[in-house]
Image (spheres, helix red, strand yellow):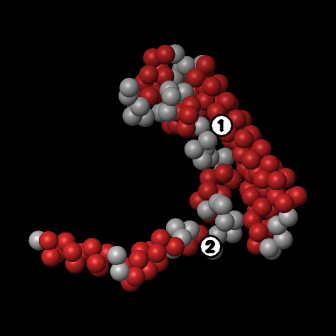
């Protein structure tokens, strides 16, 4: 048994083994993303943003018991929304989606511009900070749009409806 252990130690410490381990760790997990039109966003990301989708912006609300208007509309009967509530939720959703689509255009354009300066190999520190700020300010506005819609919707629901929504979504505590 000692002999087998000694052989394992010798093999694992050999230069060939070390080289193979090094090669394994240098392969980028991003290799499949090099063909993206905007390297920081997949086509699915862009599609989701441009249709006004949530893109995970409101997880802190959703996972803490603040229903989202899109999901709520699809579950309106199970949750027991009144006709008046459905109308208000639909209005909140329509406004959220309209504003999100507008802001997504700004965000995607900012990411495209940031990607372009790297593609052209013309990155200057002076412009980099401004481009990042533009993208992140837009991203922040998108989060606000989605999170505030969760707040608005929750304000018009009863505690029982909120509990039912959370149960149906699988968020039991």
Would residue 129 appear left or right of 98 to someone viewing this image?
right
Q: Secondary structure at mark 2?
A: loop
- Say which of 48 and 91 sits in front: 48
The x and y percentages for residue 140 are 72, 41
**What residue is rendered at 76% in x and 69% in y?**
118
Label 1 Cα neighbours within 10 Å, binned few <14 / some 14-19 / many ≥20: many
Q: Is residue 36 above or below residue 145?
A: below
**What residue is rendered at 51% in x and 74% in y?**
27
The x and y percentages for residue 77 are 46, 28
- Say which of 41 and 146 sits in front: 41
The x and y percentages for residue 170 are 39, 34
**Quadrant where the image shows the N terminus:** bottom left
Residue 63 can be seen in this image: yes
**What residue is rendered at 61% in x and 41% in y?**
57
Say which quarter of the image contains residue 114.
bottom right
Say which quarter of the image contains residue 5.
bottom left
Q: Which residue is mark 2?
A: 34
Q: Secondary structure at mark 1?
A: helix
Would residue 52 appear left or right of 106 to someone viewing this image?
left
Residue 77 can be seen in this image: no
Would residue 8 appear left or right of 67 to someone viewing this image?
left
Dots 2, 1 in contact, CB < 8 A = no
Q: Is residue 102 above or below residue 158?
A: below
**What residue is rendered at 78% in x and 56% in y?**
110
Q: Is residue 60 above or below residue 137?
A: above
Q: Which residue is mark 1?
A: 146
Q: Is residue 71 above or below residue 167?
A: below
The x and y percentages for residue 155 are 61, 19
Q: CA distance from mark 2 to mark 1?
A: 30 Å
Q: Hey, which residue is sitting farthest bottom in the picture? A: 16
- Say which of 81 and 13 sits in front: 13
Q: Earlier in the sequence, mark 2 or mark 1?
A: 2
């Amino acid at each position: 048994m000692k002999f087998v252990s000694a052989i394992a130690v010798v093999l694992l410490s050999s230069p060939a083994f070390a080289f193979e381990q090094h090669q394994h760790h240098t392969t980028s997990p991003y290799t499949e993303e090099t063909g993206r039109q905007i390297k920081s966003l997949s086509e699915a990301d862009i599609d989701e943003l441009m249709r006004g989708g949530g893109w995970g912006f409101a997880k802190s609300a959703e996972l803490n018991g603040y229903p989202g208007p899109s999901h709520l509309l699809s579950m309106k009967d199970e949750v027991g929304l009144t006709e008046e509530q459905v109308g208000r939720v639909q209005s909140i959703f329509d406004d959220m989606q309209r504003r999100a689509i507008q802001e997504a255009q700004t965000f995607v354009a900012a990411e495209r511009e940031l990607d372009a300066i790297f593609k052209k190999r013309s990155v200057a520190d002076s412009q980099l900070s401004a481009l990042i700020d533009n993208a992140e300010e837009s991203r922040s506005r998108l989060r606000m749009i989605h999170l505030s819609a969760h707040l608005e919707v929750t304000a018009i629901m009863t505690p029982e409806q909120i509990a039912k929504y959370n149960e149906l979504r699988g968020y039991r505590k």
